[in-house]
Image (cartoon, rainbow, N blue to C red):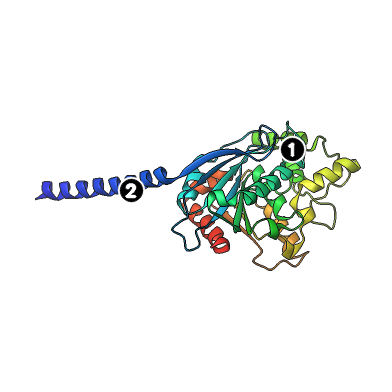
């Protein structure tokens, strides 16, 4: 009897595994994947992942646009999660953009905006509803994503922005990379931020835990040369926070994130305290551990949490 019961359990498990595998294979068989150019530069490309939305009531589906991380100096790749999001009912676009050695800031924000324009112009090809579009950025891609959320009218561009470990203030990251206890990763982020800006901020601020001039929380650089200061200010989403005109944001860090949650807390304060964005306009969360960027989605429940937030704003 024990042998029979053991066989029944093992057989049931095997059948369940086969059913799950068949479902995944079916989704993969129906999924479309293609690469497109949205500009003339070799990096101005995007990978699209989508399933037909013909069974949806209006024949369209919401979309997620992804901006990868990589210290502004490499493409970290998002194929696995792009496929997961596509199979959850989204048209997904993983966008590459000019890196810091290709062009200085704000070329990266310009590329993100150009990619969004291209996606809107070609929406019919992907059964995409352009009125239901979210932006997701990881690490330095989160810096670009929050830059889009606060640039001119963020709500016109996208319905919501998710940023995983966003480097909201490259100036704060530059200071952290100069601290005596800085890790190799923090120093790499510092050095790549300088390449992105094409200048290093000369500052008299000796406190490596703040990125603000006295009495402000805009992320301004106290005493760099004017052109350099303007660039570093513009790289920080805090400097353009304008309240309700900006896209709603969900900003997520781990407790021991190499890019600490204070980056996002300062943006939340700039939006909600200084510019009267509704209290739920910027949501900042932390999760246990030390995961960073896209690795946050591998933490228990985080991917569902992120998709839940996106669904509230796009469905």
Please report the residue visible at 52 percent of the width from the left and 57 percent of the height from the top: 60
Residue 94 horizontal/vertical position (percent): 58, 43
| Residue holding disc 1 | 193
Q: State the CA–CA distance, disc 1 to disc 2.
A: 44 Å
Dividing the picture into quadrants, the one containing residue 206 is top right
Q: In the structure shown, which secondary structural element does the residue marked by tag 1 occupy?
A: helix
State left or right for residue 7 relative to residue 59: left
Residue 132 horizontal/vertical position (percent): 59, 59
Q: Is residue 155 visible?
A: yes
In this orientation, which residue lies closer to the viewer: 310 or 23? 23
State left or right for residue 213 relative to residue 305: right
Residue 171 horizontal/vertical position (percent): 77, 44
Q: Residues within 10 Å of mark 1 (few under 14, many from 20)?
A: many
State left or right for residue 8 relative to residue 101: left
Q: Residues within 10 Å of mark 2 (few under 14, many from 20)?
A: few
Q: Is residue 291 visible?
A: no
Residue 251 horizontal/vertical position (percent): 62, 54
In this orientation, which residue lies closer to the viewer: 269 or 307? 307
Please report the residue visible at 58 percent of the width from the left and 62 percent of the height from the top: 313
In this orientation, which residue lies closer to the viewer: 111 or 260? 111
| Residue holding disc 2 | 20
Please report the residue visible at 60 percent of the width from the left and 55 percent of the height from the top: 134
């Amino acid at each position: 009897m024990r042998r029979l019961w053991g066989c029944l359990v093992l057989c049931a498990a095997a059948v369940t595994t086969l059913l799950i595998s068949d479902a995944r294979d079916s989704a993969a068989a129906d999924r479309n994947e293609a690469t497109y150019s949205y500009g003339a530069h070799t990096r101005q490309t995007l990978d699209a992942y989508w399933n037909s939305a013909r069974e949806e009531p209006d024949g369209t589906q919401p979309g997620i646009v992804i901006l990868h991380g990589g210290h502004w100096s490499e493409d970290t790749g998002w194929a696995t999660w792009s496929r997961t999001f596509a199979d959850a009912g989204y048209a997904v676009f993983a966008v590459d953009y000019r890196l810091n050695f290709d062009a200085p800031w704000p070329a990266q924000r310009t590329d993100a905006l150009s990619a969004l324009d291209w996606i809107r112009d070609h929406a019919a090809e992907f059964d995409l509803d352009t009125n239901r579009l979210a932006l997701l950025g990881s690490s330095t891609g989160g810096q670009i994503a929050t830059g889009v959320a606060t640039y001119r009218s963020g709500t016109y561009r996208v319905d919501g922005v998710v940023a995983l470990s966003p480097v909201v203030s490259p100036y704060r990251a530059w200071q952290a990379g100069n601290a005596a206890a800085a890790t190799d990763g923090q120093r790499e982020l510092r050095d790549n931020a300088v390449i992105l800006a094409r200048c290093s901020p000369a500052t008299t601020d000796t406190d490596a835990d703040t990125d603000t001039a006295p009495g402000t929380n805009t992320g301004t650089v106290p005493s760099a040369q004017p052109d350099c200061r303007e660039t570093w200010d513009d790289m920080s989403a805090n400097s353009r926070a304008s309240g309700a005109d900006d896209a709603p944001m969900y900003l997520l860090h781990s407790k021991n994130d190499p890019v600490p949650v204070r980056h996002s807390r300062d943006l939340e304060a700039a939006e909600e305290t200084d510019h009267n964005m509704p209290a739920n306009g910027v949501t900042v969360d932390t999760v246990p551990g030390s995961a960073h960027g896209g690795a946050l989605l591998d933490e228990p429940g985080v991917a569902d949490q992120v998709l839940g937030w996106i669904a509230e704003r796009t469905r």
